[in-house]
Image (cartoon, helix red, strand yellow):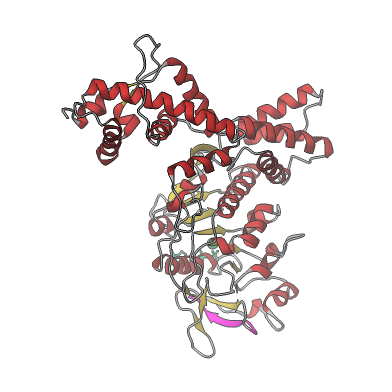
Amino acid sequence: MTISLVEVAGANFRTDEKSDKLNDEFMKRLGMRKRYLPARLAISRSLAVSAPVDLMGEETDPGKAIKGDTLFGTGTGLSVWLGLIAERSADPEMDLKKLIALVGAHWRRGLVQLDKEWEQAGQDLSKFVERIVEVADLRTGQGKPISLGGVEAAATYSNGRIEVQIGEIGEDTSTKEKIVWTMNGLGSSPHSAIMGGVGSGKTRTAVSMLRSIRGQGPVPLLAFDFKGDLGTDAKGGGYHIDELFDARVLEPPRMPIPLDVLSITSNSEIDVAEAASRFRESFSRLKGSRLGDRQRTALHEAASRAISEERPCELRHIRDTLVAYYEDHEMKEDGAISTIQEICRFPLFQPTYSPADFFKQSWIVKLPPNVAEDSRTIVVNLVLDALDQYLNSLVDADTSPDGARGLRILCVVDEAHQILGSKLPSLANLIRMSRSKGGAVMLISQSPDDFSGEDDEFLSEMGLVAAFSTNAPPKNATRILGKGANLGALQTGQCLVKRRGDQAAKRVKAW
Ligand SMILES: Nc1ncnc2c1ncn2[C@@H]1O[C@H](COP(=O)(O)OP(=O)(O)O)[C@@H](O)[C@H]1O
Ligand SMILES: [Mg+2]
């Protein structure tokens, strides 16, 4: 075989023009943004067929070219593709020209095959993927197809119990015993709430706990930072959480969040309708939106249409479909329209990463008070919605023999009162549902009041509550921490700590 990897990497590959159109069609169907992605899928689909492939006639119109290193990658990836194609052709005299012809032919045959399977799946993305997974025989030992997110995306990042000391000192003020919280223990809740007045040591204690957790497993972090002191600031100050978690700091709208935030796992009617409802709920929390029945219908309709038709769907698509809906129904522009125009003024999101790829990295989303309130609310709501959706699409996180649940992601909201006032449906959902999926939420806020939503009692879902000194009315403090809890009497660095299962709160010196 006289062919070099360098030659293949630099060569142009193409199929015929008609198949190229089908390739474009598959980009839309599968929500892919690169031409080479359906091409790869098609070539591998054809390679899974053992019959020899018919080469294309000379007379066919050629499609657009893709360069070898784009189509097949480089290095090992390229070698494997080449090996598979050569193996299938069984032609000992392979050269570049023959390879180009073979690739074009496999590409075409694969697309035809995929198109058939797409129709057989009733144009339903999840059914289609199931079928492809079956063909590829990518099944686990139990004969269960792997999840859409892939094995790696669903990984957990811890093994065994995660023991977290409460703050840098973490000592019971009377008994001097170390107070440790087992955040992922059998039957416990991995979520925590830390509260206290300004400067009481909430963030400092949270950071010390995060450091401890990260030391026990490389779990990724998603942090919302309303104050702006979690990362490293321009002067080298701040809590340096970005360094600890290898996190990227995002500052929307100056830097859009690189997440395909409205993505759905399938284009089935139910999934689209659910996604539209979730969007509407998040949107209805915005100050200016004030949705009446007509607006709610309009928004649901517009969101459904945009979500099912656009891949990836962005906020501006929903804005456009909503404006069109208003025109079609001769509705006057109102708060809903001006609010969606307002949040689309600057792109808050950019669909670079799928949820699976986004949530395995660490991020600090900075949302200081100078960012418009509606933008902050919609960012938090949509990201948390996407996280909730993503986690729920995964199989339950593994448990170790001692019953400890593996962690997949840590989600921290610092100065949560900035948004808790707007009653986040997505946060409530995440706190209720994510435990078995390896999600852990840490809420840091000023007053115990911030955690008691109208219909969601966050605090009852918490595995740990720590309260530093505040002027909170005693009623709220006692409701959470038990009778006799007096948050006004705490000294600097001290907090009352109640872990799930504790009879009474303990007074702990955290720092
Ligand atoms: N990077 C830091 N490391 C240690 N202590 C800090 C750091 N930054 C601030 N402090 C001090 O720790 C105390 C608690 O601060 P912090 O936890 O940020 O308060 P808050 O409760 O408002 O989040 C303050 O006295 C503050 O001066
Ligand atoms: Mg703070």
Q: Quadrant of residue 273?
A: top right
Locate the N terminus by quadrant. top left
Residue 163 appears at what percent x and percent y? 47, 75
Q: Is residue 298 left or right of residue 130?
A: right
Q: Is residue 509 magenta?
A: yes
Note whether 481 is above or below 269 in the view shown.
Answer: below
Residue 155 appears at what percent x and percent y? 45, 57
Q: Quadrant of residue 396?
A: bottom right
Instruction: Please indicate, yes or no, whether residue 412 appears anywhere in the rendered image.
Output: yes
Instruction: Please indicate, yes or no, whether residue 311 appears anywhere in the rendered image.
Output: no
Residue 208 appears at what percent x and percent y? 45, 69
For the residue pair 285 and 220, the one nearer the viewer reads as 220
Note whether 28 is above or below 83 in the view shown.
Answer: above
Q: Is residue 105 magenta?
A: no
Note whether 147 is above or below 454 in the view shown.
Answer: above
Residue drawn where x is 45% and y is 20% of the image:
19
Residue at the far front in the pictured view: 51
Residue at the far right in the pictured view: 293
**What span is in magenta?**
503-511
Q: How many labels, in total?
A: 0
Residue 338 appears at what percent x and percent y? 71, 32
Residue at the far left in the pictured view: 2
For the residue pair 178 and 301, the one nearer the viewer reads as 301
Q: Is residue 162 left or right of residue 335?
A: left
Residue at the far bottom in the pictured view: 175
Residue drawn where x is 72% and y is 24% of the image:
324
